[in-house]
Amino acid sequence: MTPARETPVSAALPAPLAAAAERLRGIVRRLPVQPPSFVAARLLDRLLWPRLDAEQRRLLAERCVEVEVVEAGLRVRLRLGARGFEVAPAGDTPVLVVRAQAGALVKLLRGQEDADRLFFDRALVMEGDTEYGLMLKNTLDAIGPLWR
């Protein structure tokens, strides 16, 4: 399987479309992360926040996590605050960066694919604080699918 860092979609397209897809990805990568991060935070407030207990919230709180959908170049930067998910401030350096193909993220959110398998297939890449990443993964595994 193609590593999450590459753009697998453009490889399967005819040359003119692949070039256009790469240009679009480059434009999206330069856009501010705040608007999609705000949307992601509101979604997680509905899907994940109510399912986290007080201890999980405490352990995961106040650290910036960046998630990138590789094909689109779309990035969100979030952190867990006292009242829910929030857009990470511009100066926050992510402690964990997760890069994944769109299909892999959807399968993960729906519980159709195991995070470990996606990781070993290189459809999901995590960089940064390994301990925090493992804690986040175990928390999500314990909660189960976020989206059915």
Image (tube, rainbow, N blue to C red):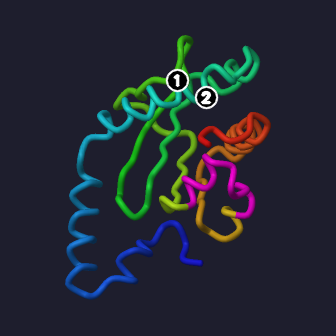
Disc assigned to residue 45: 1
Classify 10 Å Cα crowding around label 1: few (below 14), some (14-19), many (20 and above). some
The kind of residue on which mark 2 rests is: Leu
Name the residue that disc number 2 marks.
48
Q: Position of residue 95 (x, y in %)?
A: 56, 39
Q: Position of residue 18 (x, y in %)?
A: 28, 79
Labels in figure, total: 2
Dominant SS of magenta comes to helix
- Callouts 1 and 2 close, C-beta under 8 Å: yes
Considering the numbered disc 1 on the image, is that residue within a helix, a strand or a loop? Answer: helix
Depth check: give the residue in front, 79 or 145.
145
Span highlighted in magenta in the image: 104-117
Is residue 21 magenta-colored?
A: no
Q: In the picture shown, does residue 109 fall above or below 23?
A: above
Q: Quadrant of residue 136?
A: top right
Q: Quadrant of residue 32?
A: top left
Q: Residue at x 69, y 49 (%)?
A: 111
